[in-house]
Image (cartoon, helix red, strand yellow):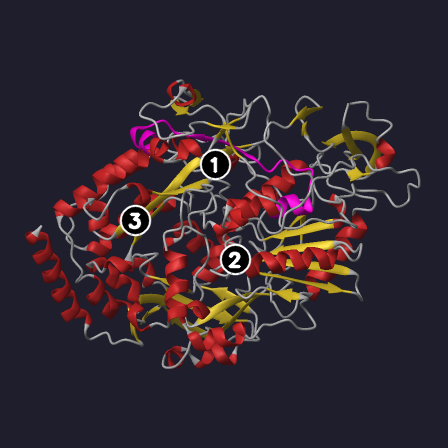
Amino acid sequence: MKMNIILCLFVLIASSQTCDEFKNYSYKPINESFNCFNSVSTTISENKILVDLLHTYFEAYVYKDILKAPPQPSFSITYYKSVDIDTELKNVNINTSCLYDFLVDIQKIIISTGDSHLNFFIRPEQGKPNALFFDFYYSLPFKVAISNTKQMYLLPQSLTDPFNESIPISIVRNQNIVVKYINGKDPFDVIRRFADLFVPLKCPHARFTNAQKSFTFGSIGRTPLPKSYLNTKFEIEWENGEKDVISYFILRINRSSMSKRARKKVDRVFTSGIGNILLPEDVFDSLSRDFNKLKKNEDFGYVSNDKMVSCSVNTTKKINTFVLTSFAPDDDWQNYQLVIKQCINLFDENSYPIQIILPLNGGGYVTYAQNIEKIFAPHDDVNLIVGARISNFTEKVMKQVEAKSIKNPPNCQPREKTNVDVLGDWYMNPKIINYGKNEHKIIQPSLIDENGEIIERFINNQRKPTDIVVYTDSFCFSGCSIFTKGLKERGSAIITGFGGDPNGNIDEFEVGQSPTTVLFLNEYLGKSSDPFIGYGYGVSLSFFETFRFNYNYTETIPREFIPDIVDERVNIFSFSSNDYSTFIESTLTIIEKYKTRCNPKNKRLVKKTTNCDSKIKIPHAHGGYECDDNGFWSKRCVPTYCDYGYLFDFDTKRCILQSCPIVQPDGFHDIIDPKDSSSQETSTSETTSSDINNAFIHKIHFMVIVLIIFVL
C-alpha cells in the first residue's frame, strides 16, 4: 500500500511538472498538448490488473455472446458489427507506460460494441493521476449547422475569452456561406468518419446526430481521441471560393476551477450513464446564462427549472408542443413532475394534435420513461420483459439486490423477496439461445413492471395515435428509446425522424438507441480496497436486455438488435427552444396526411375508431382501420388494444389478463370518434388517484429500476 502511494505521488509530481506549462484557461496545439498527456504514466502491473478485472466484470455484460455473431436486419447483412470482447481485451497493449495510450486501447473496444451503456470511465473525484485528463477538452474553432435544404454551414464555436482568439477570421467571415468541400470531399464525410470511429451507437443516424456535436467539442477525459486523429487537418472550401485549413486544439479548464453548476453538469455527463452530449455551455458559465434566462414566455406555457421539460399551446396553428430533453431531472424532481402535470392539464383543455420533440435526449429513469408513455398511450403495456446473462458476477449482483427488483411474469411476484444464498430455478435453470455457434445463457424471462402512480392523465381529450407526432433524432438514448420503441411497437403515435444524416437512408433511421438497463459495477465492488476503485476508475454495462412484447415469452432477439424505423422523415436538422415553428408546420402536414394515408410498413398503427367495436369479435378488444399496402387507410377493422386490466397480444390476437397490478385512470374517458354519435365508453371503472407518487423520490438510474443508484 505504501509503495502504491509513493508511486502515485511520483506520477503526480512528474506529470504536474510537464503539465505546469499548460496553464488553466489556456489552449495549445495538439503536439504540445500531448507532451502533457504522455507524461501521465502507468505500469505494466496496473494495466494487467485492470484488463483482468475487465475480463471478470464483462462476464455480466448481457450482449457479450450475441456480439460475436449478431443477427442482422433484412436490409443489411453488415448492420451490426461482430466483436469478440475477450479477444479484444487480450490484444490490449499492457506493456505501455503511457496511460493515455492504454485508455485509447480500452476505449476502442468500448466503441466497437456500439453500446454507450458499456463504459470504462475515470472517476475524477478519486484524485488519482488519471483525473488530470478531465481538465482538458478538444475543440475545433467552429460548430456545424445544417440547413433544411441539407447544406452545411460552419459557425464560430461557442467559446469564451481567451479561447475566442483561437477562432480564425475565415470562420467568422464565412458563417453564412455554404461549405462546398472539406478535404476535397462531401463536407458531411468528416462527421460520418468521426461517428464511425468514436461514437458507440449502432444506428448510423444516431451516430451522426451525436457526432455533429461531439466532432467539434468534447472531453479528453471522457473520449481520449488518438493523437493521430487529433492531428487531422481540415481543408475547408466555401462556395464563394475561399479556402482555409483548420486544426484541432486543446483547451485546459481545470475541474477544480469550474463553477459548482458546471462541475455538477460535467460530472453528471461523465459518470451518470446518461447519454447526454457535452456542450460548451455545460462548461462555460457565460454561455449558460442566456440559456438559463429561458422562462415562461409567449412560446412556452411551462418550463421546468432544469429546462428538461417544457410545453406550449399555439392557438393560431392549433398545435400542442411537449419538449423533453431528458428523462432524468436534476435534483428538483418535484418541479419536473409538476411541469409534466401542468402540461398535460394544459393539453387537456383542447383537442389539438400533440407534437412531442426529443432533441438530443440522453435518457434517464425507467420510471419516467414508462410513466410518460402511459400518459400519452394509456393502453400500452409499459412493463419491460428482461433477461440477464448467467455468470459468476451476475449471480453476485442478483443475490445482493437485483433478484428483488425483477418479477415472475405469471404472478408479478419478485423473483426473490429477500437476500438468498442460492437463487431459484429462474436463475439455476437458464434459458439458452444460440447465436451462430455462440451459446447465450440468460435468466428465465422476467419483468420490470411499471413503478408508481401515473403523474397525470388526460380526462377530457385523450388523443388517438394519429393525433400524436413524436420527433426523434435517432440518438434518443436509453430511457428515451424505451419510450419511443414502446410507442412504435404498440402503434401509439406517428414516429418522425429529424436530424441525423441529411443524406442517410430512411430505412436505417431508428426511433432510438439502447433500450437496455444499465448497471454501475462500482455499487457492487465494495470499498476503495477494490483495485478498480483504488485506481480511480468506474465501469457501467448493459445488464438487463429487453425483449419485444410476447406473452409466450419466446423472443430470442433483444430489442437492442431490432431496428424500429420511423414512420416519417423530415428535413429538420436543428432544434431551438426559442423557435419551433418548423416543427409545427411539419406536424400539421403529417397530421393532414394521416387523415387518409398511412405507413404501410407499420401495420400496428391504425386509425382508431369505435366504429370497429361491433366488428371486432375478440372479447375486450378494440382497434381501428388497418393501413393498406398502398399506403391508404382500409376499411378493415383490426384489434390493437383492450379494456383496462387486459393486454393485447399481437401474436395470438387476443386480450389477456394483466398479471401485474395496474392503476385505473381516475375519470378517464376512452378515445371517442367525434363523428360517431353512437360511440360509448368501453370502460368506465375507476379508482382513486393519488397525487404525485412518492416512488419518484428515489433517484434510480434509468434502467435498473428502484435499486441501482446514480453514481454522482
Label 1 vs label 3, nearer the camera: 3
Q: Amino acid at mark 1?
A: Thr
Name the spot of residue 539 as percent of width and height, x first.
32, 46
Q: CA distance from mark 3 to mark 2?
A: 26 Å
Question: Measured from the top left, where is residue 459 in percent x and y?
Answer: 76, 49
Q: Which of the two labelled residues, at mark 2 and mark 1, occupies the earlier sequence position?
A: 1
**Label 2 is placed on what type of residue?**
Trp
Do the residues bearing badges 1 and 3 touch, measured as CB atoms within 8 Å? no
Structural crowding at the residue carrying mark 3, measured as other residues with C-alpha within 10 Å and reported as few (<14), some (14–19) or many (≥20):
some
264 relative to 585 in the view: left or right: left
- Mark nearest the camera among 3 and 2 is 2
**Front residue of 150 and 120:** 120
Tell me which label, 3 or 2, sits earlier in the chain: 2
Rendered image: mark on residue 333: 2
Q: Residue at x 32, y 49 (%)?
A: 107
Task: Tell me: residue 271, above or below residue 203.
Answer: below
Residue name at image x 26 percent, y 51 percent: 537
Q: Is residue 660 left or right of residue 652?
A: left
The disc at residue 538 is: 3
CA separation, marks 1 and 3?
31 Å
What is the number of the mark on residue 78? 1
Circle 1 packing at 10 Å, graded few (<14), some (14-19), many (20+), is few
* Residues rendered magenta in the picture: 372-396
In the rendered image of this protein, does residue 354 appear above or below residue 171? above
